[in-house]
């Protein structure tokens, strides 16, 4: 019985990881259930048993991805102190992050698909993104709480927009130009 529960938990974890990678790299429309199941080393039946539907898998992958960001921000604040915002922005707009779509940030990779998702997924996104903006605002210097919140949203928008645009570029030099332009704008709006 314990072995069976462990195997089920491992299968669910593998299916969620495969879903996350697939949705981040290919988008919701770009991947099917069979491909996700195969990547996880599972059957389509196991996919449905664990995640319910493709929408359910997307919802779970989104939640997991945004929770990663929620965990990362305090880590950056602890590791880099007053320079955390600069370190985070440089990582976010950096070439390795830009090129690693399958493991890159869910904010950039999944936001376009969230706009077409079911209401419960959009509500989850709203809630998690608000938490992310609040964490960023808490780590900003100067200004009233509402000013820091506005700057946090602007900072996030520049990072997500810059990375989205750079990832869409086929010309590597142009992609570098986009992220190089976005970085100082993001830092300026954050007050770094």
Image (spheres, grey):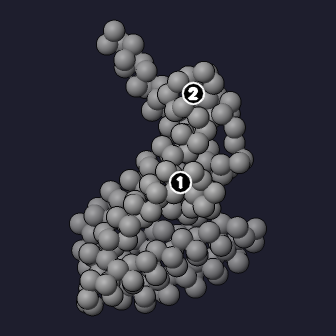
The residues tagged by marks 2 and 1 sit, at their Cα atoms, a distance apart of: 21 Å
Q: Quadrant of residue 160?
A: bottom right
First of labels 2, 1 by sequence position? 2
Asked if the residue at tag 1 contacts the one at tag 2, i.e. Cβ–Cβ closer than 8 Å, the answer is no
- Quarter the C terminus occupies: bottom left
On screen, 108 above or below 178? above
From the top left corner, tell me how far across and down residue 159 is, in percent. 51, 74
Mark 1 lies on residue: 119
Observer-nearest residue: 75 or 24?
Answer: 24
Find residue 17 and report its horizontal and vertical position in percent. Answer: 50, 39
- The disc label shown at residue 15, or none: none
Residue 190's place in the image compared with 2, above or below, is below
| Residue 145 visible | yes
| Local secondary structure at mark 2 | helix
> Which mark, residue 48?
2
The percent coordinates of residue 29 (x first, y second) are 71, 48
Residue 49 is left or right of residue 171, and the answer is left
Residue found 72% across the figure and 47% down from its top:
30
Q: Residue at horizontal 43%, vertical 77%?
A: 153
Percent position of residue 171, x then y: 75, 72
């Amino acid at each position: 019985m314990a072995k069976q529960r462990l195997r089920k938990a491992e299968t669910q974890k593998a299916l969620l990881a495969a879903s996350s990678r697939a949705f981040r790299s290919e988008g919701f429309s770009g991947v099917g259930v069979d491909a996700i199941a195969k990547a996880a080393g599972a059957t389509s039946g196991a996919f449905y048993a664990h995640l319910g539907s493709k929408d359910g898998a997307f919802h779970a992958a989104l939640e997991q991805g945004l929770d990663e960001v929620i965990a990362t921000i305090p880590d950056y604040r602890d590791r880099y102190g007053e320079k955390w915002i600069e370190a985070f922005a440089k990582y976010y707009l950096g070439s390795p992050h830009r090129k690693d779509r399958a493991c890159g940030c869910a904010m950039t990779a999944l936001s376009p698909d969230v706009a077409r998702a079911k209401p419960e997924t959009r509500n989850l996104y709203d809630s998690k993104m608000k938490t992310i903006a609040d964490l960023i605002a808490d780590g900003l210097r100067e200004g009233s709480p509402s000013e820091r919140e506005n700057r946090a949203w602007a900072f996030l928008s520049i990072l997500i927009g810059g990375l989205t645009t750079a990832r869409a570029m086929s010309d590597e030099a142009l992609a570098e130009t986009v992220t190089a332009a976005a970085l100082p704008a993001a830092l300026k709006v954050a007050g770094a």
